[in-house]
């Protein structure tokens, strides 16, 4: 046997199983990466669903605010108070699409003179509109705004 063959025979026993250990380590690393990707995808799905529900409730509350503004805009005279709390409109729950709903109330705040307008004929009426929107799975949003409308008075 020559010198080269002896070196191969003596070097081989030290390296037995090296490929198996390396393969197992690579499979382990890839498995951990796969589990991480699956976990991240699941978390991202939950977050995007929660964001979707939140946006639906915001849009519902905004729809309630727009309905209140429309009520005030189409009133030819200042709306009268319904009770001592100065509420001029108390809209109960209104269904929108699927599980989305809204409700609102409009409350009289003040009647002020508007610069440039005859104070004996015109007043700027201010109302506070509070709107509540809901969506499925506990999506709740409240919107509060102050709305002004110029009305002709005393005619």
Image (cartoon, rainbow, N blue to C red):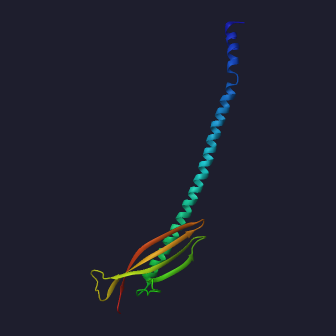
Q: Quadrant of residue 100?
A: bottom right
Left or right: where 35 falls relative to 147: right
Q: Nearer the viewer, residue 2 or 11?
A: 11
Tell me where residue 95 appears, x and y as whole percent. Answer: 58, 75
Q: Quadrant of the N terminus?
A: top right
Relative to 14, residue 78 above or below: below
Total tally of numbered discs in the picture: 0
Residue at the far right in the pictured view: 1
Residue 94: % across, % down? 56, 77
Q: Residue at x 48, y 77 (%)?
A: 67
Residue 148: image x %, image y %? 38, 78
- Please state if 69 lies on the left or on the right of 116 as rendered: right
What residue is at 29 percent from the left and 86 percent from the top?
119
When asked about the image quadrant of residue 127, the answer is: bottom left
| Residue beneath the point at 56% across and 77% down | 93
Q: In the current view of this chain or complex, which residue is farthest to the front?
A: 84
Q: Is residue 90 left or right of residue 21?
A: left
Residue at 45%, 76% (x, y): give it.
Answer: 129
**Residue most toward the left?**
116
User: Which residue is the extreme one toward the top?
Assistant: 2
Q: Is residue 20 above or below residue 78?
A: above
Percent across and percent down for residue 91 are 52, 80
Placement of the C terminus among the 4 image quadrants: bottom left
Task: Tell me: 70 left or right of 114.
Answer: right
């Amino acid at each position: 046997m020559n010198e080269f063959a002896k070196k191969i025979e003596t070097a081989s026993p030290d390296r037995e199983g090296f490929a198996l250990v390396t393969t197992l380590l690579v499979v382990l690393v890839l498995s951990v990466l796969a589990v991480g990707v699956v976990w991240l995808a699941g978390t991202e799905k939950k977050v995007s669903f929660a964001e979707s529900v939140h946006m639906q409730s915001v849009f519902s509350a905004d729809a309630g605010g727009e309905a209140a503004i429309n009520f005030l805009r189409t009133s030819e005279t200042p709306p009268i108070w319904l009770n001592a709390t100065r509420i001029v409109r108390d809209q109960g729950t209104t269904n929108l699409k699927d599980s989305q709903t809204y409700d609102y109330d409009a409350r009289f705040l003040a009647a002020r003179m508007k610069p440039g307008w005859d104070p004996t004929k015109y007043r700027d009426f201010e109302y506070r509109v509070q709107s509540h929107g809901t969506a499925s799975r506990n999506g709740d949003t409240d919107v509060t705004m102050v709305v002004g409308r110029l009305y002709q008075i005393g005619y």
